[in-house]
Amino acid sequence: MFETLGLAALIGLFVAAGAVIFVAGIRMTGLADRLADRTGLGEAVAGAVLLGAATSFSGSIVSLTAALDGHAALAFSNGIGGIAVQTAFLALADLVYRRANLEHAAAELANLFQCVTLFILLMLPLLAHTAPEVAIWGVHPLSLAIPVVYAIGVRATGQVRSAPMWRPVGTRETRTDAPDEARSRSGSVALLVQFAVVMMFMGVAGWVIAKTAESLILRLDLSQSLVGALMTAVVTSLPELVTTLAAVRRRALQLAVGGIIGGNTFDTLFLTISDIGYRDGPIYAALGPGDFFWLVIGALMTAVLLAGLILRQRNGPARMGLESVLLLVIYAAAVAVQVWRG
């Protein structure tokens, strides 16, 4: 169907699907914040689990669709490229929040632990690529380990929040997570239903983006890694930008930071989905060294973010933290390298 469309129609569908994801992301922020209050999860955990998973849903559909169609590099770079751009979005949110460095004001131990979990998850595909090639029904065992590590990390994050062994020092710039709504099981069910409906729209939009991206790759003879990292990853990451800026505006700062880190952590599950969907053997065997460029960038940016969350600089250049400046510089340099390589 998509192969018969003209170039203008393909670009139009790509943009329209991105707009659907953009609007759905705005709606999702308010729902996640209210669910955090009503369920007692807290903003950081709700951001990591609910908001992180939901805003990444369209991206997971892109990676699965690309893998099923045999586009290994597109499936891989879409998920990994999304981690880098979403971390850069957090630096933009820091620029918008004028009171202090966002990472200082949103002090939350759960977000620190999520960063550590994310770094571990990013090392697993690198290990799979460099280790001997093995497979279980065409899937690398480390791909199957990723959701297990993710689940353990989410559970441990909840424990860190409910029974912390460390606490951040409070300052006058620190914004604590105070619920705006009372806990209510009946109200939570209604909000979850709305949440699921919004996710359905985002899933359909993600499928359209994957199909149009594949057609554009063939039509314009573009690199799969270039399209995955700089086109589909950026468009499907728009919910993270919208929800992060909206959360900052609502002063739900832990939700803003937790949503980005949680979304990045959830994005590593794209690799499991992609490996299962790719039927020509383990997906890592079909990738070249250049396809892992964005994985290294994502790990580097995660390490810089973690350092910023630990250091908690109150103010830096343009009232941003130094880590935010570094994140933007790293991402801009990575984009330049990717465009130069093609």
Image: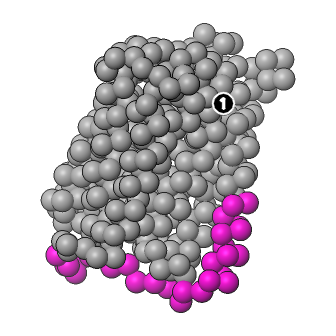
Work out which residue is located at the far bottom of the displayed protein and give it.
182
Name the secondary structure under disc 1.
Answer: helix
Residue at image point 56% right, 36% down = 273
Front position in the image: 255 or 332 = 255
Residue 248 among magenta residues: no
User: Would residue 14 be found to the left or right of residue 306 on screen?
Assistant: right
Q: Position of residue 223 (x, y in %)?
A: 52, 15
The image quadrant where one finds the N terminus is: top right
Residue range (magenta): 168-197
Residue 99 in view in this figure: no
Instruction: Give residue 334's position: percent from left, percent from top.
Output: 34, 28
Asked whether residue 181 is in view, the answer is yes
Q: Residue at x 40, y 33 (%)?
A: 142
Residue depicted at 43% across the width and 71% down the height: 43
Image quadrant of residue 280?
top right
Q: Position of residue 316 (x, y in %)?
A: 19, 57
The amino acid pointed to by label 1 is Thr
Label 1 sits on residue: 65
143 versus 50 height, above or below: above
Q: Quick check: 10 left or right of 50? A: right
As displayed, is residue 269 above or below residue 184?
Answer: above
Front-most of residues 183 and 149: 149
- Crowd around label 1: few <14 · some 14–19 · many ≥20 (10 Å): many
Q: Is residue 195 magenta?
A: yes
The quarter holding residue 216 reads: top right
Residue at the far front in the pictured view: 136
Q: Position of residue 153 (x, y in %)?
A: 36, 55
